[in-house]
Amino acid sequence: MAAVASRIAGVKGLADAGIAMVPGEYRRDSDPRQCVEIEEIPVIDLSDVEKCSPARILAIDSIRSASRDWGFFQIIGHGFPEQLMANMMELVHDFFRLPIEDRSVYYSEDSSSKFRMGTSFIPSKETRRMWQDYLHQACYPPCEIAQLPTKPPSYVKISTAYAEAMNRLAKRVLGLFSESLGLESGALEEAFGGERHAMRMNYYPPCPEPELTIGLDAHADPNGFTILQQDTRVKDGLQILHCGAWVPIKPLPGAFVVNIGDQLQILSNDAYKSVEHRAVVNSERTRVSIASFYGPAEDSHIAPLAQLVADEAPACFKESVYGNYLQSFYASKLDGKAAIETVRY
Ligand code: OGA
Ligand code: NI
């Protein structure tokens, strides 16, 4: 019982209690904050992509090269309301500021629950925990309004407005990904056979010994692609593995980070790669990030697109049902790119 209570209280509970040392199960062997600040990931302007064809061609070319070379890029000029970005960020901070009695009813260790609060990744099984708590919310298909928090009072309104605007942006980005692969703009949408869109709101409280632990272990996202809002008030957090080195992704005000997930790697027949990334923590202030995971419908069968398979480029991956892929992802510990290797020929 005590173990469950401590999982419900999460790392927010440890931070609030004012612990001076990171407990053993959170420790890692090396300081994950060590990284190299080489180049920055590409920044792509989507301002005129719907209107003007030179801007569209430029954006599509940039998406193609960023997806091949980095698997990550930032987008600006995306049209997503800035106020809504700020409100959503504040909402997550406000939720976690609530007393634990108000939050604990949402705690669940069932990865299929459509709305839940959690800590680390699979805390009941992990021997090495991560310094983060989170909220998970299914967006499309949505969870019942009745499952969503009643506090803060604006929770339903802001989170559903955010999910709606994000869904529109994700569909536009999906069309651009299709064209960047030389396909009709609806090709990936068709291959997705519907959609699964969920958000993970990561909450990383200050940590007394950030050099000894990690906020989020190295992993690749299992979905189609991810659109991430970073906390512009915190400098360090997200890092990506690029050419064998960990590179920090500095938050750019107003921008979203976009990254390729496993399903896009599979559909593109390895032309695009999901890239390993992780998050580090700091001792000064809470960092929040909002990850919107966009991908195929859970019952869709995903395999390399026929248009991208040829005699000289045979299919690299076996077909899998996306829902099954996700289930095995959520049943195993975060382990770099291990998931996609299980479906490679
Ligand atoms: C994720 C993720 C990065 C971050 O939620 O999958 O990679 O900066 N988050 O929190
Ligand atoms: Ni991720």
Image (cartoon, rainbow, N blue to C red):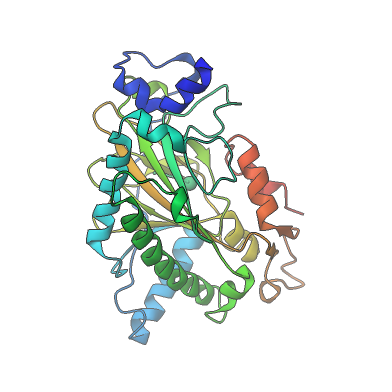
Residue 299 quadrant: bottom right
**Is residue 86 positioned above or below 116 on the image?**
below
Q: Locate residue 147, reporting x and y percent.
A: 47, 48
Kindly tell me whether residue 94 is visible in this rendering: yes
Q: Nearer the viewer, residue 326 or 276?
A: 326
Q: Is residue 268 left or right of residue 64?
A: right
Where, quadrant-wise, is the N terminus in this rendering? top right
Q: Residue at x 36, y 20 (%)?
A: 14
Q: Is residue 156 left or right of residue 141?
A: left
Q: Locate residue 98, reporting x and y percent.
A: 30, 34
State the count of labels: 0
Q: Locate residue 7, reporting x and y percent.
A: 48, 25
Residue 164 quadrant: bottom left
Q: Nearer the viewer, residue 187 or 59?
A: 187
Q: Residue at x 25, y 40 (%)?
A: 234
Kindly tell me whether residue 242 is visible in this rendering: no
Where, quadrant-wise, is the C terminus in this rendering? bottom right
Q: Nearer the viewer, residue 261 or 54?
A: 261
Q: Residue at x 45, y 35 (%)?
A: 105
Q: Locate residue 306, reporting x and y percent.
A: 71, 74
Q: Nearer the viewer, residue 168 or 76?
A: 168
Q: Is residue 339 left or right of residue 85?
A: right
